[in-house]
Structure formats: structure tokens, C-alpha cells
Amino acid sequence: MNSNVSAMQAVLAKIEEYDKIVIFRHRLPDGDAIGSTKGLREILRLSFPEKEIYLNNCDSSDYLEFLGDEDEPLSDEFYANALGIVLDTATAKRISNPRYELCKEVVKIDHHIPIESYGATDWVEEERSSTCEMIVQFYAAFRDRLKINREAATYLYTGMVTDSGRFRYREVSGDTLRLAAILLDQGIDADRIYAHLYMKDFASLKLQAWALSNIKFTENGVAYLHITKTIQEKFDLTFETASTAISFMDAIKDSLIWLAFIDNADGSIRVRLRSRFVTVSEIAEAYGGGGHACAAGATVGSPKEMRQLLADADKRLGDYKANNEGWL
Ligand code: AMP
């Protein structure tokens, strides 16, 4: 794959220009958001020991706590003299830490469908399977100036495997595997990473048992689950565990689109959209969200809006089935 070399050079030039760097990501972080930020921090700390480089975000993930903590909050003054690097985030409103705006300059590095350019320097490659893949590509392109170690490789590998569906999704290329090989060569314990990713707490298994008999289907076969506040309380679920409901519907024949609606504490509803073959990112975008063609997210304000989104997804799947053959 041809990487955008001039964009990578521009990012490196910015990094070299600043003594202080703060790294950010999106809220409700997944493996790619956490892996890419921690991986980049480690690469930069190793490569530029004289610089002050921190991760400052406002939320965390229980599921990924095995990757360790982030840094203590920094002063406004620190931000004012720092380069901000925002990873894995298509829109400014999804950035976990709104203080990113205090940074002297902002660089955006992302693999989502571009919605908004919030950085003075943007490096976006939407065909990459993860932002972690981009960070490994960045290291590989500037091996003469950058260093990597086992710790950085562990973070980056975690993000690569989670965002690519364990190297299953169509964005996975020969490059993806060549870049993953660089990480394995650092001697990471991939078996241990997978153990962390697959071991579940019992509450989540009970949710799965409930979910399998409560999945609903629209006329054209969109599968969906609504994890209401009541269900969250009944199974004693954290919001993060409730959100895993999306994964229970990913292999139902005929249901090429599947959706999970998770009630937020403030009355709004988080929507997670997934699909095979059919594009769902446009549906998410129509409701102020975004993501990738087959994995996207949004937030809707009410059950009425939720039903509208469901009807849109149903129509999209109906149109797809009417105009395509050969899907499973
Ligand atoms: P999720 O279901 O939250 O894992 O999201 C699937 C993909 O869509 C991820 O790549 C997210 O970064 C992206 N995404 C989720 N929610 C939003 C949103 N509200 N706006 C833009 N992108 C989103």
C-alpha cells in the first residue's frame, strides 16, 4: 500500500519542532485508541528522551486496563507550549479531552472516513485497518530516527488485532500483516494479550445469555438489541459491558446489518452499527456520528430517533438485498 509519505514527513517535522507533546484520543476508548496513543508515546519517549511527552484524556476503559494508566493532568501553561497529537478520532467533538484546544498546534492522525479537519497537520488514511497500523508504518518509514521496544509493540499489537477483528476485516492488507510482524519481532506475548481480550466477567456472559433470546429483527432482517437502563441495572452492567452487546449479533445469516442501542445515563442512546458488505457509516453520519463503512457509531436523543435510525437501516438492507446477489 502506498502510504502518504509527505503527510508522515510533516508529522515527524512537527514532532521534532516541539519540546512538549500531549497525545489525545477519542472518548469511550477502544483498543485502537488506547493502543495507538500509548504506542506512540512510548516510541516518542524512546526516540526523543529530551522531550516531555504525555497522554492526557478524560475517560478510560475497564476492559483495557491491562494496558496501564495514562498521565496526570497537565497545566494550561504546559498545553499552551505543546504540540497536541490527536489519534483515531474523525471529529473534534469526540475528542476525550476538550483541553486539546489549548495546545499551540494540533496534528490529527486517523484511519476513519474523514469528516472534519481539526488539526493544522492532518494525516488520514481511511484504507488502513487501524490507527495502530499507521503508527507502526510511521515507525517503519523513519527507522533511522525512531525507536521501538516490546512495550510499545504490545500496545500497538493490541490495537491492530482489536480494530481489524483479529485480522479479519476487509481493510486488512499485506501491509497490515507485514507491519504486525515488526511488532511480533519485538518479542511480545500475543497469547497473553488474547487472554486479556477474551476473558469475560460473569455479568457479561449473563448478558449474552439474555441477549441471544431477545434479539429483534426488522422486516428486512436488521438484527438489533436495546440495552435499556432497566436491563443494565438487572444485570448490574457497566456501560462498557452493556456496549459489548453488539458482538452477539455478528454472525446471523441474512442479518447483514446489526445494531446495538445502549441507554446513556443522560437519556440519550448510544448506537453501535455493524455490517457485512453493506455500508452503514452514512446512516451514522446522518445522525451526527461516523466511523467506517462497516463499523460506525452515533448518539441519538430519543427512542423516536432510535426508531427512525432503525427504519433507515432496514431500508438500506432492503435496498441492498434487492440490488445484490451472492451475499450469504
Ligand atoms: P463503536 O461502535 O463505538 O465501536 O464505533 C465504531 C466505529 O465508529 C469506531 O471506529 C468509532 O471510532 C466510530 N464512531 C463511533 N461513534 C462515533 C461518533 N459518534 N462519531 C464518529 N465516529 C464514531
Image (cartoon, rainbow, N blue to C red):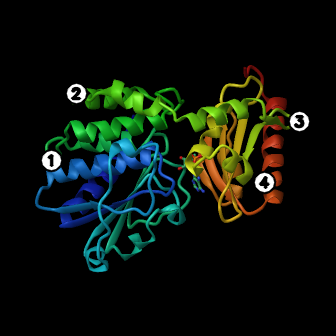
* For residue 46, side relative to residue 94 (left or right): left
Residue nearer the viewer, 89 or 145? 89
Q: Amino acid at mark 1?
A: Arg
Q: Quadrant of the C terminus?
A: top right
Residue 283 x %, y %: 71, 50
The reply to whether dot 2 and dot 3 touch (C-beta < 8 Å) is no
First in sequence: mark 2 vs mark 4: 2
Q: What amino acid is found at the position of numbered circle 2 in the picture?
A: Gly
Q: Which mark is residue 306?
A: 4
Is tag 4's residue or tag 1's residue first in the polypeptide sequence?
1
Q: Is mark 4 within 8 Å of ligand 1?
A: no
Picture quadrant where residue 267 is located = bottom right
Front in this rendered view, residue 288 or 140: 288
Mark nearer the N terminus (2 vs 3): 2
**Which amino acid does the dot numbered 3 rest on?**
Glu
Q: CA distance from mark 2 to mark 4?
A: 46 Å
Earlier sequence position, callout 2 versus callout 1:
1
C-alpha span from label 3 to label 4: 16 Å
Mark 2 vs 4: CB contact within 8 A: no
Q: Which residue is mark 1?
A: 145
Residue at the (19%, 60%) spot, across then down = 16
Tag of residue 219: 3
Amino acid type, callout 4: Met
Q: Which residue is mark 2?
A: 187
Task: Quote the CA–CA distance across marks 2 and 1.
Answer: 21 Å
